[in-house]
Image (tube, rainbow, N blue to C red):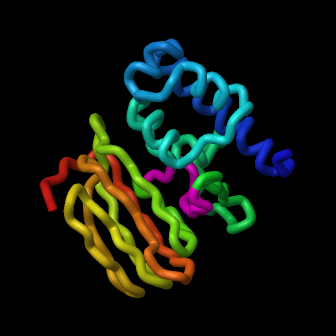
């Protein structure tokens, strides 16, 4: 049985996905066709009968033209300039153990989102190319070492390294070491972006 906090988060993510799908005017079948995720799985996630993985949420977010932060932040509040650590939404990928904390205030006026990520030793998280409304992002390594695979190119990042890249190509974050890694992702949506 899932811990109470995980059940609450699964319900909130499910409600948020259903709201975003409805706002986009999509049926379950349309979202399934656009995302490559089965109608049954989308239904289970929306009803909180299944915990969504990072890979699954990435596909749904790309099909809905929203960021993962839009789903995980679950903010239905008016924009604020300050968000305390205790109020920052946390999410954990049930497959990889990947953890992310949405540090930015909800709907920040700057259009910038700051995400703090903990990638466990040996874990990897893959993302499909973003089809529409692509955004740019930077990753700043705080602790450990990771490899960022962008298409066929791998870039290894160590503490203090910063990489600027887009989400128009397949991206995989991999911790090949035996120590957890921590990094910050800074995202800005709406800018066009060239190849790395």
Residue 101 in sight in this render: no
Q: Is residue 134 above or below residue 195?
A: above
| Residue 196 shown left or right of residue 120 in the figure | left
| Rendered location of residue 43, percent (x, y) | 63, 22
Residue drawn at x 64%, y 55% is 91
Residue drawn at x 29%, y 50% is 170
Is residue 148 a member of the stretch shown in magenta?
Answer: no
Q: Is residue 107 above or below residue 160?
A: above
Most common SS among magenta residues: loop
Q: Is residue 187 above or below residue 116?
A: above
Q: Which residue is outermost to the bottom?
A: 159
Q: 55 and 14: which one is in front?
A: 55
Q: Bounds of the magenta span?
A: 96-109
| Rendered location of residue 106, percent (x, y) | 57, 50
Residue 10 in sight in this render: yes
In the rendered image, the quadrant that contains the C terminus is bottom left
| Residue 133 shown left or right of residue 92 in the figure | left
In the rendered image, the quadrant that contains the N terminus is top right
| Rendered location of residue 79, percent (x, y) | 58, 47
| Residue 85 shown left or right of residue 166 in the figure | right
Q: Is residue 53 above or below residue 179?
A: above
Is residue 99 a member of the stretch shown in magenta?
Answer: yes
Residue drawn at x 40%, y 75% is 146
Q: 196 and 22: which one is in front?
A: 196
Q: Quadrant of residue 84?
A: bottom right
| Rendered location of residue 151, percent (x, y) | 23, 55
| Residue 129 shown left or right of residue 60 in the figure | left
Q: What is the total number of numbered labels drawn onto the structure image?
A: 0
């Amino acid at each position: 049985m899932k811990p109470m906090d995980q059940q609450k988060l699964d319900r909130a993510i499910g409600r948020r996905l259903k709201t975003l799908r409805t706002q986009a005017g999509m049926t379950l079948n349309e979202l399934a066709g656009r995302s490559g995720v089965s109608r049954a799985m989308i239904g289970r996630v929306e009803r909180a009968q299944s915990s969504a993985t990072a890979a699954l949420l990435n596909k749904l977010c790309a099909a809905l033209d929203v960021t993962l932060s839009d789903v995980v932040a679950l903010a239905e509040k008016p924009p604020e300039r300050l968000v305390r650590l205790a109020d920052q939404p946390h999410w954990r990928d049930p497959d990889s153990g990947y953890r992310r904390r949405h540090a930015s205030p909800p709907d920040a006026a700057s259009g910038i989102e700051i995400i703090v990520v903990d990638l466990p030793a040996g874990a990897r998280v893959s993302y499909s190319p973003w089809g529409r409304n692509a955004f740019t992002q930077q990753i700043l390594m705080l602790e450990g070492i990771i490899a960022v695979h962008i298409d066929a190119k791998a870039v290894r990042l160590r503490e203090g390294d910063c990489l600027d890249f887009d989400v128009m190509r397949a991206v995989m974050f991999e911790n090949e070491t035996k120590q957890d890694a921590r990094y910050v992702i800074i995202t800005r949506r709406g800018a066009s972006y060239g190849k790395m």
